[in-house]
Image (cartoon, rainbow, N blue to C red):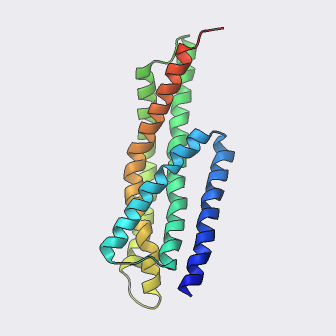
């Protein structure tokens, strides 16, 4: 049974990742933004694997299901952060164009900082609700609790690491990408 389930997971996990990539690309129409969001997946997996190790759980079908659910939530948090970073940057660009000046590096940093700060509370509330809902499952007992613990464990560990790194990593990568774009745009001759 375990071998059959593992074979199915080797098909389901790549299909899930490809579906996530396609949906992200259809939404953003930019592969760089898709790759920034996909950067949250390894950080989420690290936290999930870490908690599995601490609890002494081995890889199983239930753990695989937990990781698939974790991937969806981690991508959602990344999308929310990136959308608000883009909105803050667009607002800063509009303000710069109204006074007919180029976007400065300090204005770019301010826009990214403001966009990231606007999402701290909603992301923390989302993560707190997920973790609070899963902790009773992780520490519960009764019929089916052994399986449910293994589904909840990767999600709890992954949500903690994905949140911390999403709040720090995505704005930093977005800032580096936009600085590079800003330098490239300012070095091109005006036509």
**x and y percent of residue 21 in the render?**
62, 52
Question: Disc count in the image?
Answer: 0
Give the position of the N terminus as an image quadrant. Answer: bottom right
Front residue (pair 171, 16): 16
Q: Residue at x 41, y 37 (%)?
A: 172
Q: Residue furthest bottom?
A: 143
Q: Residue at x 45, y 43 (%)?
A: 170
Rendered position, 82 above or below 52: above
Residue 75 location (% of width, % of height) = 53, 54
Q: Is residue 92 visible?
A: no
Q: Nearer the viewer, residue 190 or 122?
A: 190
Q: Answer with the quarter of the image where residue 68 lies.
A: bottom right
Question: In this view of the protein, which residue sits in the foreground, 91 or 54?
Answer: 54
Image vertical order of residue 182 relative to residue 190, above or below: below
In the picture, the quarter occupied by the C terminus is top right
Q: Residue at x 67, y 40 (%)?
A: 29
Q: Where 58 falls versus 81 (above or below)?
A: below
Query: Where, by quadrant of the figure, is residue 106 drawn?
Result: top left
Can residue 85 be seen here?
yes
Q: Could you tell me residue 122's position as x and y percent? A: 46, 50
169 above or below 136? above
Relative to 165, 100 lies left or right: right
In-image side of 43 versus 89 (left or right): left
List the single residue furthest toward the right: 26
Percent position (x, y) of residue 30?
63, 39
């Amino acid at each position: 049974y375990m071998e059959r389930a593992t074979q199915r997971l080797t098909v389901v996990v790549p299909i899930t990742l490809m579906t996530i990539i396609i949906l992200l690309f259809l939404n953003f129409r930019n592969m760089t933004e898709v790759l920034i969001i996909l950067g949250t997946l390894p950080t989420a997996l690290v936290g999930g694997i870490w908690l599995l190790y601490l609890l002494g759980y081995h890889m199983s079908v239930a753990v695989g299901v937990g990781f698939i659910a974790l991937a969806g939530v981690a991508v959602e948090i990344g999308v929310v952060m990136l959308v608000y970073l883009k909105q803050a940057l667009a607002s800063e660009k509009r303000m710069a164009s109204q006074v007919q000046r180029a976007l400065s590096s300090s204005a770019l940093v301010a826009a990214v900082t403001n966009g990231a700060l606007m999402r701290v509370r909603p992301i923390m509330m989302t993560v707190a609700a997920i973790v609070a809902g899963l902790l009773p499952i992780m520490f519960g007992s009764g019929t089916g609790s052994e399986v449910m613990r293994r589904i909840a464990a990767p999600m709890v560990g992954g949500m903690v690491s994905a949140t911390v790194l999403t709040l720090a990593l995505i704005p930093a990568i977005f800032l580096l990408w936009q600085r590079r774009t800003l330098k490239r745009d300012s070095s091109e001759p005006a036509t």
